[in-house]
Amino acid sequence: MNRQTQAAVLLLIGVALLHGALTDLYLRYVKEGLRPLLLAAGTLLVVTALATAWYEWRRARREERGTGTGTGTGTGTGDGDGDGDGDGTGDGDGTGDGDGTRGHAHRESRVSWLLVLPLFALVLVAPPALGSYSATHTGTALQQPYGYAELPAGDPVPIGLVDYAGRAFYGHGRSLEGRSVRLTGFVAVTPSGTPYLVRMALNCCAADAQPVKIGLTGNIPPVLQPNAWLEVTGRYTVRRTRDPVNDGPIPFLRVTAARPVPTPRDPYDETWNN
């Protein structure tokens, strides 16, 4: 891959990063807090690509002007007179011609341009967020939090799914007593038919995303479509179970109302309470 191709690929990568960071596309890959780093990386790649292209253009111009020709001629004569007579004449002529152009350059393989196809896919096709299949085949990642912030006033109180799960299981519901909560997640149904409300929590990017699950009981909608997003209102219940995948804790929520909602702007829950 020559320098021009490298510059083009760098430019496309930088533009793809900037496109993802300036829209919500990046939320399908990394957590929201990494947006400034993506903007910085995309800007650096674009500047590097433009600098590389400018340098190659300058070098090509110098090579065009570097073609030159040089010629040199030299003649020498010697005459000697003595007991013997000798005459020696030497004539030498040297001509040199130098061309500053380089030899024939090999044609670059076009297969290197296939490297840009994933970039077009990144820009044109937004992958779906991890959903019910990943949730039912991966054990819950709920861990004990360090502490609990005081719940705000109001009823029902909006609360993150991970926050509710930690308070319900490790806090034994003490901070939830007498409170109605409202939380959002997508639906996953186990092979045995138990409905879960799930959010995928991540530390850095979608590659390390893990589900946090709560079971649903009470006034559950009669038809639950996996991957459908629900806003659920309910109260704490002492019911709990263990995840069959990794034996992790799964608390329950007694549902009083539920309604479908669109997929949120950020489908991953970044609220880790560990």
Image: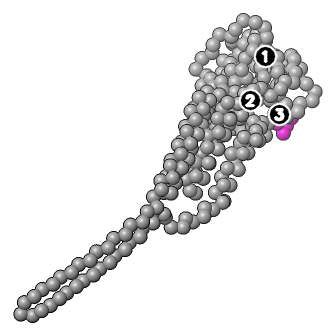
What stretch of residues is rendered in magenta? 189-193
| Precedes in sequence: disc 2 or disc 1 | 1
Residue positioned most to the right: 222
Judging depth in this view, the residue of 153 and 266 nearest the camera is: 266
What residue is shown at x 52% (from left), y 54% (from top)? Answer: 60
Residue positioned most to the left: 83
- Would you name the residue on which mark 3 appears? 227
Mark 3 vs mark 2, foreground winner is: 2
Look at the image and tell me in which quarter the N terminus lies.
bottom right
CA separation in Å, label 2 and label 1: 17 Å
Residue 51 is at least partly visible in this image: yes
What residue is shown at x 7% (from left), y 90% (from top)? Answer: 82
Judging depth in this view, the residue of 180 and 32 nearest the camera is: 32
Where residue 109 appears, as percent x and y from the top left, is 63, 62
Residue positioned most to the top: 153
At numbered mark 3, what does the secondary structure look like: helix, strand or loop? loop
- Would you name the residue on which mark 2 appears? 267
| Precedes in sequence: disc 3 or disc 2 | 3
At numbered mark 1, what does the secondary structure look like: helix, strand or loop? strand
